[in-house]
Amino acid sequence: MAKKAEKPVAKTAAKPVAKPAEKPTAKPVDKPAKKTAEKPAAKAATKPVAKVVEKPAAKAKAKSMTKAQIITYMSEKLSLTKKQTGDFLNEFAELAYKEAKKDFIIPGLGKLSLAQRKKRTARNPKTGETIMVPAKKVVKFRVAKACKDAVLTAKK
């Protein structure tokens, strides 16, 4: 058997790899704390001080009920099984989809209807180009006065 000739490998000096400096997690104890309250009088006089106005804290928005929560609530309230209540909600939704073409009124809640939008011109806000938006049908829901009164007076 013939042996393959090995190529001589040139030996080079290995370069040391620099390790990234680790950032200290705590401040060193030997440094005195900086005083931020004291400022030179000249700088304080030249810059107007802005008033800090505290905004009222935003109220946490209540989460809406899920379908499962609605089914559970209604089944307990009406003494029905969850299966019956779920079937009722599904059938009610199916009926609303079919009848929306002719206006579907839910007493005390509102009216679901189909509306025709005309074609119109619009403007692309990014490019400023004028485009035509075609005519289309849309589903609208108009809230009943009884619902508005019940919801809006409850907040006061």
Image (cartoon, rainbow, N blue to C red):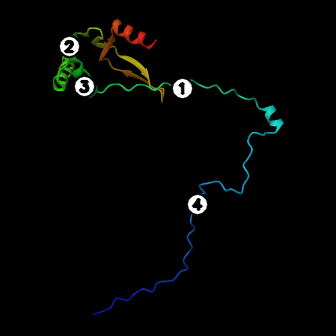
152 vs 18, left or right, is left
Identify the residue under disc 2.
99
Q: Quadrant of residue 13?
A: bottom right
Mark in the foreground, 4 or 1: 1
What is the CA distance from the residue labelled 1 to the residue labelled 2? 44 Å
Query: What's the residue type where badge 1 is placed?
Result: Ala
Mark in the foreground, 1 or 3: 3
Q: Residues within 10 Å of mark 2 (few under 14, many from 20)?
A: some
User: Along the polypeptide, which appears first: circle 1 or circle 2?
Assistant: 1
Query: What's the residue type where badge 3 is placed?
Result: Thr
What is the CA distance from the residue labelled 1 to the residue labelled 3? 33 Å
Identify the residue under disc 1.
57
48 vs 62, left or right, is right
The structure residue drawn at horizontal position 20% and vertical position 13%, both measured from the top left corner, is 99
User: Along the polypeptide, which appears first: circle 3 or circle 4?
Assistant: 4
Identify the residue under disc 3.
72
User: Along the polypeptide, which appears first: circle 4 or circle 1?
Assistant: 4
Mark 4 secondary-structure assignment: loop
Residue 43 in percent (x, y) is at 80, 36
In the rendered view, would you say 56 is above or below 151?
A: below
In the rendered view, would you say 67 is above or below 37?
A: above
What is the CA distance from the residue labelled 4 to the residue labelled 1? 39 Å
Which disc is residue 22 wearing? 4
Mark in the foreground, 1 or 2: 1
Residue 98 in percent (x, y) is at 19, 16
Which disc is residue 18 wearing? none
- Asked if the residue at tag 1 contacts the one at tag 4, i.e. Cβ–Cβ closer than 8 Å, the answer is no
Q: Residues within 10 Å of mark 4 (few under 14, many from 20)?
A: few
Q: Nearer the viewer, residue 126 or 28?
A: 28
